[in-house]
Amino acid sequence: MFDYIEEVDALVPWFFPVVVFVFGACWGSFLNVVIYRLPAGKSVVRPGSHCACGQPIAWYNNLPILSWCLLGGKARCCGQKFSVRYPCVELLTALLFLAAWMLLPVQVAVAGFVFIALLVAATFIDLDTMTLPDQITVGGCIVGVLLSFALPELHGFGGDEPFLLRAMRSGIMGMMGAAVGSGVILWIALSAETVLRKEAMGFGDVILMGCIGAFCGWQGALFAIFGGALLGTVVVIPLMILQKLFGFAVPGPGKVVKAGKEGVSAALDKEEAEARSKAATEEKGGEKTGTSAAPVQPATTSSTASATSADRPEAVAGLAEDGEQPQLGMGVAIPFGPWLALGGLVYFLIMRGPTDAYLDTLTTIIFSPLGLAQ
Ligand SMILES: [Zn+2]
């Protein structure tokens, strides 16, 4: 089957990329439903898409990306505005599917579609509600391990050896990745908890790392944890400097829990806070998928991010330390999941080769004096 795909690809090079892009956009459309309904405990299958006014949305007004643009972001039935986030999630998913298709071998790309869908859903749900639903994290772990067995190429076991042998090796890599991913982050979370004397990370992050490890192996799990933190810092530090220079307030959810956290995580706080409040603002546009007129409320765990504190992020951030100048990133709770997802995705799409080569060299250097390598 996969050989056949490669033959068609050689004959009509644009065919599969277009198909994959459209396929990704359709998945993005479904992920929008998942992102809004799953945290609210609603079925993601029934009922079909509804406008905020209660009217069902016809399929021809519900085409991924296109319909939003054609209708100018408004509902056909009542003119209610739809958030720009809907087409953005669809476009993002489509582009990531396309990237996986172009950059990876066919078998890995197929597993990648599942991985991308899980990460996109996890990211936006975490941004919205500060929680990661088990259906995505635990489900992702199980699916990742199963796909490791079914598609040995996922962990680099191509070759001519018997399929069963490759499947076993790949499956073991998947399980090892899940164990290392969740194990390392659990250790970090427990250490931080001991030092800070408060909960530093949700258990959802631990299981999400299991899912990322199952798809990426232990090397990818390590990359996702440390690369994700690094990426966060690279994005956040320029923002911090800008804020210092111009003194603009970065709005955030304003939940004070992590005063005195070390640099990286503290910096991550604010970035996420900003992203989250942006998402919250965009959400006000309308609710495409719910059955009632009221927008789906985030789960109760996130209710601490109240409107009052969001209005005055500096005041809340200032509570972190008595008498201290309110600083960007201090004491604002953030979801860590999106950064883990971003790290996992970067590894999966482009960094697998360099990272594995680097870790191979590193383990050789560490273990060869002990006579343990090879
Ligand atoms: Zn309507």
Image (cartoon, helix red, strand yellow):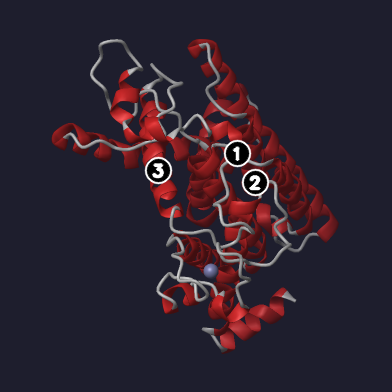
* Residue 40: image tag: 2
Question: Label 1, label 3: how many angstroms apart (C-alpha)?
Answer: 16 Å
Residue 176 placement, left or right of 230: right
Residue wearing tag 1 = 299
Q: Is residue 360 above or below residue 91?
A: above
- First reached walking from the N terminus: tag 2 or tag 3: 2
Q: Is residue 357 visible?
A: no
- Assess disc 2: are there few (<14), some (14-19) or many (≥20) residues with their C-alpha within 10 Å of its C-alpha: some
Could you tell me which residue is drawn at 36 percent across and 17 percent down?
A: 320
Q: Which is nearer the eye, 372 or 116?
A: 116
As drawn, the residue found furthest toward the bottom would be 11
Three-letter residue code for mark 3: Ser
Residue wearing tag 3 = 277
Q: Which is nearer the eye, 202 or 369?
A: 202
CB under 8 Å between discs 2 and 1 = yes
Could you tell me which residue is drawn at 58 percent across and 32 percent down?
A: 301
Q: Secondary structure at mark 1?
A: loop
Q: Is residue 71 above or below residue 343?
A: below
- First reached walking from the N terminus: tag 1 or tag 3: 3
Quarter the C terminus occupies: top right
Image coordinates of residue 1 in percent, x first then y, are 75, 76
- First reached walking from the N terminus: tag 2 or tag 1: 2
